Amino acid sequence: MKYDVIVVGAGLAGLTATAELADSGRKVLLLDQEPAASMGGQAWWSFGGLFLVDSPEQRRLGIKDSKELAWQDWVGTAGFDRDDEDYWGRKWAEAYVDFAAGEKRAWLQQMGVRMFPVVGWAERGGYLAGGHGNSVPRFHITWGTGPGLVKPFMERVKAHIKNGTVTYKPRHRVDQFVLENNQITGVHGTCLAPSKAKRGEKSNREVIGDFVFKAVAVVVSSGGIGANFELIRKNWPSRLGTPPKRMISGVPAHVDGRMLEITERAGGRIVNRDRMWHYTEGIKNWHPIWPNHGIRILPGPSSMWFDAEGNRFPTPNFPGFDTLGTLEAIQKTGYDYSWFILTQKMIEKEFALSGSEQNPDLTGKNILQVLGRARGGVPGPVQAFMDYGEDFIVADTIDNLVIGMNKLTGERLLHADHIIEQIRARDREMDNKFTKDLQITALRGARHYVGDKWIRVAKPHKILDVKNGPLIAVRLHLLSRKTLGGLQTNLDAQVLGKDGYPISGLFAAGEVCGFGGGGVHGYRSLEGTFLGGCLFTGLKAARGVLAHLQ
């Protein structure tokens, strides 16, 4: 055999596994169906958020975190309730929290990865202490965002390509595994025609040949199903209502889930198919790169959130508190969109956009531009959406705002009087330092954290006060993103068969295995855990393969 290991998929998990294996002197064949321009996969497009526990960045901001508190938040969020399907996912979760509180930061720092000093507070929960959400800020932004995180792994792999330890073959699509004597010993596939598609763009599927490659072990790191709307709807859980007729895509077209089905045909077990992580604050990209390209708003807590008929969502469906809970609430309305209503002062401080390309200051590591965020004004990428994006309405009065909102949807579902009544009720609560409106309590509480006060949460104010205007409405779409279930794996990253035993020679890493065990997150995520899950499973897969090769 020419190769020790074949890695299928050149995203962050595949690059991590490849780099670690090659560092140990193993001959690795790295295959990917996309052109070389897309090396790094989805991670390159990400905001670069990483879940860390009791980090120096947290401590400098006065945040008191611990592994015990993080584990409390994880299990309260995951809601593991399937003894069989969740068995390995829970074990991976324990191992991951240990990793996030232990070697993760130092391991990355050795490769030159640095963190932005202000820690974000994602998925704030809004329930009891043992329920969903982060008790403290844990969302660490990579300095350089997604490309900054991908770069050291890509450089390590390219160095090994140069010295001959790694062979990289883009435009090689795996179609099935080679099985000999009850062991996976390679892959069959098709060679796709060369493509000039740039990173993220849809590439052709023209077949120009085929291939067979053999190895002692195969690592599947091919991603999830986020761009495959047919498969998303097929696996949509009844607890979240009827599958949405319209969604936008937060991932490129190549995130199609093919290798899940191929691995299942080879005997691999898929668990937790119905668990997914789709965002509720999606907007259509005015400058799309892939089909149905959507961007997620990373909102501060002040915007008022209304359903398609203009009814304010109940507690705790506030921006940034409970993604899955709000998804369920939206689905129950019978519509597949909702609305933010906010002020100019709110959007200046509270709107960020997810994605490396939407944060040129952080991605480009430009300190002066980053400091500009604290000076006020609408961030450039957000302003571009206000100017060119179809989902933004700006007006001087609620009446004109509602006219624009109804015109955008082509439906007269919204009535100005009904919306004004709800906003006025909220504004009256601003006259005192105490309130019964839990959203106001939450945003005031958020400003006790210095990171939020500096750059994330606007000073509380009345929405209908003209001094804070103009008024802004944003139509929010459902945005596909992550697959929380997948191939069940043990802690050595071996893919398990339907009998619960490992399939010899077959390993998995990243989203294809639910970021570990077939569902490390359970039902919900604490955020910052997807990229970290790719890193951790890639690392564990490499270690598992090395043990297998001995």
Image (cartoon, grey):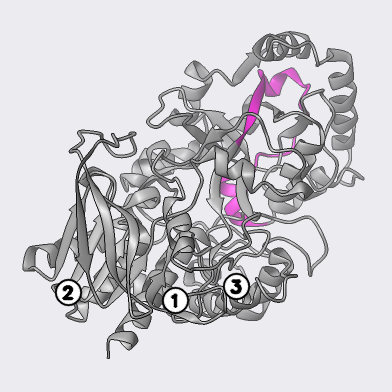
Tell me the quarter of the picture where residue 270 sits. bottom right
- In the image, the segment drawn in magenta is 449-478
Q: On screen, 372 above or below 215? A: above
Q: Is residue 549 above or below residue 121?
A: below
- Percent across and percent down for residue 17 are 32, 70
Question: Which amino acid is tagged 2?
Answer: Lys
Q: Residue at x 8, y 68 (%)?
A: 164
Among all residues in the image, which is located at the extreme left?
Answer: 163
| 10 Å crowding of disc 2: few (<14), some (14-19), many (20+) | many
Q: Are marks 1 and 3 in contact (CB under 8 Å)?
A: no
The image position of residue 222, as x and y in percent, is: 39, 56
Sequence-earlier tag: 1 or 2: 2
Q: Which residue is mark 2?
A: 27
Separation (CA) of disc 1 from disc 3:
11 Å
Does label 1 or label 3 sit earlier along the sequence? 3
| Quadrant placement of the N terminus | bottom left
- Please indicate whether residue 357 sits to the left or right of residue 72 in the image: left
Mark 1 is surrounded, within 10 Å at the Cα level, by few (under 14), some (14 to 19) or many (20 or more) other residues, namely many
Query: In front here: 17 or 49?
Result: 17
The residue carrying mark 1 is: 493
Please report contact status of discs 3 and 2: CB closer than 8 Å, yes or no: no
**Residue 534, x across and y down, in percent:** 43, 64
Residue on which the image places disc 3 = 89
Q: Which structural element holds mark 1? A: loop
